Image: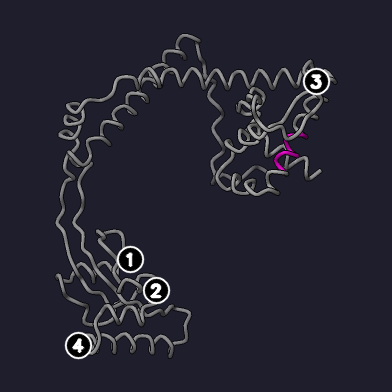
Amino acid sequence: MKKLFAAAAALSVLLAGSAFAAAPNSGKKVLATVGGETITQADLDQAMSGFAPQQRAAYASPQGQAQLLDNLIDFKVFSRSGSEQKLQNTAKYKEAMANLEQRLLFTLATEKILDEAGKTPATDADAQKYYNEHKEIFQVPAAIRASHILIRADKNMPEKDRKAAQEKTSALIRDIKAGKITFEDAAKNNSADGTRSRGGDLGYFSKGQMVPEFEKAAFALKKGEMTAKPVTTDFGYHIIKATDSRDASIRPFAEVKEDIKADLVRQKQVKAIQDERSALRARYGVKIAAPEAPASADKKPAK
């Protein structure tokens, strides 16, 4: 039973629209036959193409290929059995086919609108106009580049351990200031953060990206400055060094032009779908019966 469930899951992609049944077999290695119908490597490849990457990896091994072939055989024999039992004449089959037809027609109708709306590309002039009218979208906030050293300490640690971590941080600050060790080496040898391998470098960041205590201390530094005492956050104790800064700016048009053009086409497609939706609802006389308002959450049910 478990095997049959696995087969159904593996083949759901085929039922959802793959060309398994119509895959050409000519010139392909035949792996199995069901009655007079063949299953080839091309059929396995077709089934594989519909899977997510993780599923494809699971079926890539010889054992996985054998399992997929087994699933395809199950698909063939059970579908044949269903046909022989005339299950295609049942109400359940007809209802399922009607639902499938509606989904397919919906997909084809919306794809047609999107294709038509997307035929005319946006021009450079269109993009320039949009850029000029929406420059606030392309603003890059002021940012600094900083490095840090983290000595881990959390609120659940014994007080003596927290104090030892704070003292270690203060000692490192003194050693760095005295020139006994560089900031980068101190980070590589002591930091509990993943940035230790690159000397504590955090890269550029703007306001709102770091925890408040860290951000306040970092943005108060000038380029080349280091915090004079440990900075406390929920992660522990930090030593922060500002290494660079950049002012707020607006991304140049050349850098964003192609993105704008693609977005303008998408906007046109969305509008085309929305316009057609409104027109179709009017044409087919859609009427919506408003659902009853849910009972207020603060009202208790009557006993």
Residue 15 image offset from top left, x and y in percent: 66, 28
In the visual, does 9 lie left or right of 168?
A: right
Q: Which mark is residue 179?
A: 4
Residue 46 image offset from top left, x and y in percent: 61, 33
Marks 2 & 4, CB-CB < 8 Å contact: no
Amino acid type shown at disc 4: Gly
Q: Which residues are magenta?
A: 67-73
Rendered view: 38 above or below 98: below
Q: Which residue is mark 2?
A: 235
Cα distance between the residues tagged 2 and 3: 64 Å
Total count of labels: 4
In the visual, does 285 lie left or right of 31?
A: left
Which label's residue is closer to the chain start, 3 or 1? Answer: 3
Q: Which residue is mark 1?
A: 211
Between residues 13 and 223, which one lies in front from this camera angle?
13
Rendered view: 208 above or below 243: above
Quarter of the picture containing the N terminus is: top right
Circle 3: element type: helix
Which label's residue is closer to the chain start, 2 or 3? Answer: 3
Which label's residue is closer to the chain start, 4 or 1? Answer: 4
Circle 1: element type: loop
Rendered view: 145 above or below 138: below
Amino acid type shown at disc 3: Ser
Which of discs 3 and 1 lies nearer the camera? The answer is: 3
Cα distance between the residues tagged 3 and 1: 64 Å
**Quadrant of the rendered structure where residue 289 is?**
top right
